[in-house]
Image: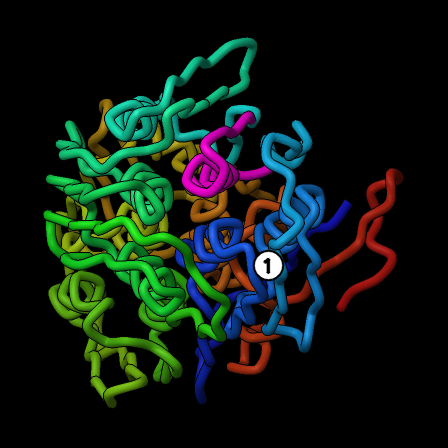
Amino acid sequence: MEKISVIGGKRLHGSITVGGMKNAALPILLGTILVGDKCVIENLPEISDIKSSLDILSSLGATVKMLDRTTVEINTASVRPGTMPYELARSMRASYYVVGAELGRFGTSRAACPGGCDFGVRPIDQHIKGFEALGAKVDVVDGCINCVAPEGLTGSSIYMDIVSVGATINIMLAAVLAKGMTVIDNAAKEPHVVDVANFLNTCGADISGAGTDVIKIRGVESLHGVTYAIIPDMIEAGTFMMCAAATGSDLTIENVIPKHLESITAKLEEMGVDIEDFGDAVRVKSVQGPLRRINVKTMPYPGYPTDMNPQIAVLLCLAQGTSILTEGVWDTRFKYVEELTRMGAHITVDGRKAVIEGVSALKPATVKCSDLRAGAAMVIAALATEGETVIENIYHIERGYEHLCEKLRGAGADIKKIYVPDTGSATKAV
C-alpha cells in the first residue's frame, strides 16, 4: 500500500512549475482517433490517467511511442472501433471521448460506460442527445454505449440543457467530420474546451466560437497529423496557490496562464492573500494575520471551478469566522468533509451547501482521499498542520497530479510517499 506522509507547519518558498492540463490532454489524446494519422502531443502531465488513455489507444490498435517524459507520438491509422477493453473504459470518466471520436470517424462505436470520481449521478444524456441529433442511433445496454450512424453523421443545431464540458467536447469530436454545420448552443466555455478545438483546427477541422456559449463546427472531409502542445493545468496551478495561502508562504507558480486563474485569484485576494501576475507565472504571498472568511459558489467557467471546491474548503477551515461554500455543479462533492473533520474542522453540510466555522489550527491525523481533488485538499490541510498527517488512497491524487511530493519537497515541504506492507509498518520512503 502507498501512502503520503506530511510533516506540516513549514512555509513554502521558491517556485513550482505546473504541467500540462489533464482535462485538455485526455480528450486531445483520444481525439487523435479522428485523425487516422501520426500526431505528436507535447506537454503531457505525467499522471496515471494519461497512461490509461495511452493504454486505451494501444488497445484500439494505435501505435503509441513515448518520445520523452511528456511527449508522445501516436499513429491512429490502424484503430479498430468498438474494441476498448471494459476495464480501461471503467478506469476514468474521460474514456467516453472514445465514443465521440469513433463515431465521428467510423460511424460506429461501442464502449463500456465510463468510471472516474464519484460525485453522485453523472449522466451522459447530453452526450447521447448530441449524437442522436447528428444522426446516430444510441442504446445503453448492460453498461455499454452502442452507437451507429448507418447513413453517416449530418450537422445539426444542438441546445445543451445544462452546461457540460464533457458533452460539449464529445459532440465537437463527433461533428468535425460530419456533413454540413453543427451548432452547439449553451456550450461549455472552459479553457480545455478551447484547447481541444485548437488542436482539432490545427489538424484541419473548422471550428469557431470555442470559449463562447455558441460553437460552430463546419464538417470537413478529413484531418491530418500535427505536433501540438497541451496548455498548462489551471487546477494544478490553483492547488499550489492554495498550498501557499494555507501555509502563509511566499511561492511562485510557473508555467501558468493567469487569465485562467482569475476566479481563483479573486477569492484568494478576498481572503487577504497577495497575488502578483508575471504573465506566465503568479506569485502568492500571504499577508500577516489570519485569513478572512468569505462565501464561495462553484460554477461553470469563468466562475469559480468545482475542481477547486475541496482545496478552498481547507482555507475556509483556517479563516477567521464562518464561511459558506456552495457547490453549483455536482450533487455530492462534499465527501471529503468527514476527513477534514478528523483533523478538527467544524463543517456542517446541507445538500450542496457547507457552513464552515474557522478554527485556529487543524490537527494531524490519518485521512483518506475520497476522490482526486479531495486528495489534493488533504495534502493542503496536512501542509498547514503541525505534526505528521498520513494520507491514504493516494491513487486518486496520482490520477491528476504529477510528481506532487517531489514538487512540494522542492519548495520546502516535508512530504514523502511511503510504502506500507500488509503488516502496517513503513518499509521505504521516496
| Nearer-the-camera pick, 62 or 430 | 62
Within 10 Å of disc 1 (Cα), the crowding (few <14, some 14-19, many 20+) is some
- Residue at image position (19%, 53%) is 189
- Residue at image position (45%, 74%) is 229
Residue 313: x and y, percent? 30, 48
- Kindly indicate the quadrant of the structure image that contains residue 348: top left
| Nearer-the-camera pick, 324 or 329 | 329
Residue 51: x and y, percent? 65, 54
Residue 423: x and y, percent? 88, 40
Q: Which residues are magenta?
A: 91-110
Q: Secondary structure at mark 1?
A: loop
Above or below, 275 relative to 356: below
- Kindly indicate the quadrant of the structure image that contains residue 368: top right
- Kindly indicate the quadrant of the structure image that contains residue 367: top right
Q: Can residue 340 be seen in the rendering of this structure? A: yes
- Residue lying at the far top in this picture: please name it: 142
- Residue at image position (84%, 62%) is 428
Residue 309 among those drawn in magenta? no
Residue type for callout 1? Ile
The residue labelled by disc 1 is 47
Above or below, 104 relative to 246: above
- How many numbered marks, from 0 up? 1
- Residue at image position (11%, 48%) is 213
Residue 106 among those drawn in magenta? yes
Q: Main secondary structure of the magenta part?
A: helix
Locate the C terminus by quadrant: bottom right
